[in-house]
Image (tube, rainbow, N blue to C red):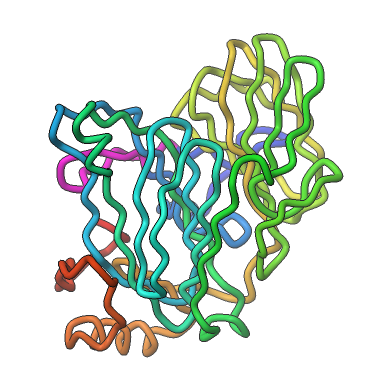
């Protein structure tokens, strides 16, 4: 993390998400950044879309591997068919949560369904990775789907809060986190105000749509504001806004990233690279394609 001066008494850092082309569609990537790699356990944070594809075209993320992290998919619009090497095969829709723990190794694919391709794919959402504590990095892989109806929803004075994972505002998500985590989807009407409590050690907000202010600083869409620790902050909406609140307890040490692999050990990443290159990861049933191992990738999915 590069040295820097805090933006204000409540904002430590502003990160402008960078556009990335993932082969046919683009994303905005906020984490990892040169100025900040992690916020709590969150080590990867992409905004997909909003995108509209031509009829007949769709999202086609071929089978690829992960280790030592949990992937989190949360959609605002559209749908994605998820398949993984555990045999999971289901469709995620807006407001649902897919929580896939890679542990010692998993492979999965993400594609648009035939029906959505026929009508024209529209997609908007957030894909993020949560790095696992060292004691869980080699755990057995698992997958859990949590429908929108099972997540806590809180509403008050122009604010709607969906608790995606962890604990927030006195509510607890059914998602099984492996370290203290904070992940909330917030919708604010213009003029509305909501606190970002200091319950969690590291916290950030990411503005998906609209403009908000924290400590008098305007934060526009596509920007992540990392908050100062141990201080309550308030989000005030200049316009109607969609905001993600994220963070949790600081991880137990540094994490290394290569492509889709995250680990506290560089040697473990080298072993994962060799395993994927030599087809030792489990296969995804019904999806026999594979993304080849890149030779050199400084950032995941690059």
Residue 77 screen position, x and y as percent = 42, 30
Question: Considering only vertical position in the picture, is 54 above or below 225?
Answer: above
Q: Nearer the viewer, residue 147 or 206?
A: 147
Residue 172 x %, y %:
78, 51
- Say above or below: 219 vs 224: above
Q: Quadrant of residue 277?
A: bottom left
Q: Which residues are magenta?
A: 16-28
Question: Residue at 29% of width from left, 72% of height from top?
Answer: 284
Q: For residue 28, which quarter of the picture?
A: top left
Position above or below: 202 against 67: above
The image shows a total of numbered marks equal to 0
Q: Please identify the dominant SS of the magenta region.
A: strand
Res. 201 in view: yes
Image coordinates of residue 37 in percent, x first then y, are 48, 58
Q: Position of 226 compared to 48: left or right? A: right
Is residue 1 visible to us here?
no
Does residue 237 belong to the magenta stretch?
no
Residue visible at 61% across and 20% down in the picture: 212
């Amino acid at each position: 993390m590069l040295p820097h001066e805090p933006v204000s008494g409540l904002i430590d850092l502003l990160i402008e998400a960078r556009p990335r082309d993932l082969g046919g569609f683009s994303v905005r990537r906020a984490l990892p950044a040169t100025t900040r790699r992690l916020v709590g356990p969150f080590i990867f944070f992409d905004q997909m879309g909003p995108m509209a594809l031509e009829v007949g075209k769709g999202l086609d993320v071929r089978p690829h591997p992960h280790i030592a992290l949990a992937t989190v998919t949360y959609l605002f619009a559209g749908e994605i068919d998820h398949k993984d090497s555990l045999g999971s095969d289901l469709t995620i829709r807006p407001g649902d949560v897919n929580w896939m723990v890679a542990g010692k190794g998993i492979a999965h694919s993400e594609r648009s369904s035939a029906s959505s391709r026929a009508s024209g794919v529209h997609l908007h959402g957030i894909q993020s990775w949560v790095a696992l504590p060292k004691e869980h990095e080699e755990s057995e892989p698992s997958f859990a789907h949590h429908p929108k109806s099972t997540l806590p929803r809180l509403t008050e004075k122009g604010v709607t809060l969906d608790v995606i994972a962890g604990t927030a505002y006195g509510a607890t998500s059914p998602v099984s986190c492996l370290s203290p985590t904070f992940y909330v989807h917030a919708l604010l009407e213009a003029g509305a105000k909501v606190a970002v409590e200091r319950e969690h050690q590291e916290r950030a907000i990411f503005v998906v749509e609209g403009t908000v202010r924290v400590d008098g600083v305007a934060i526009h869409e596509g920007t992540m504001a990392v908050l100062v620790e141990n201080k309550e902050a308030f989000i005030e909406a200049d316009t109607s806004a969609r905001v993600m609140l994220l963070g949790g307890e600081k991880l137990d040490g540094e994490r290394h990233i290569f492509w889709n692999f995250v680990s506290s050990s560089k040697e473990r990443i080298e072993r994962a690279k060799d395993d994927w290159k030599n087809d030792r990861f489990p296969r995804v049933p019904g999806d026999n394609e594979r993304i080849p191992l890149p030779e050199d990738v400084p950032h995941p999915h690059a």
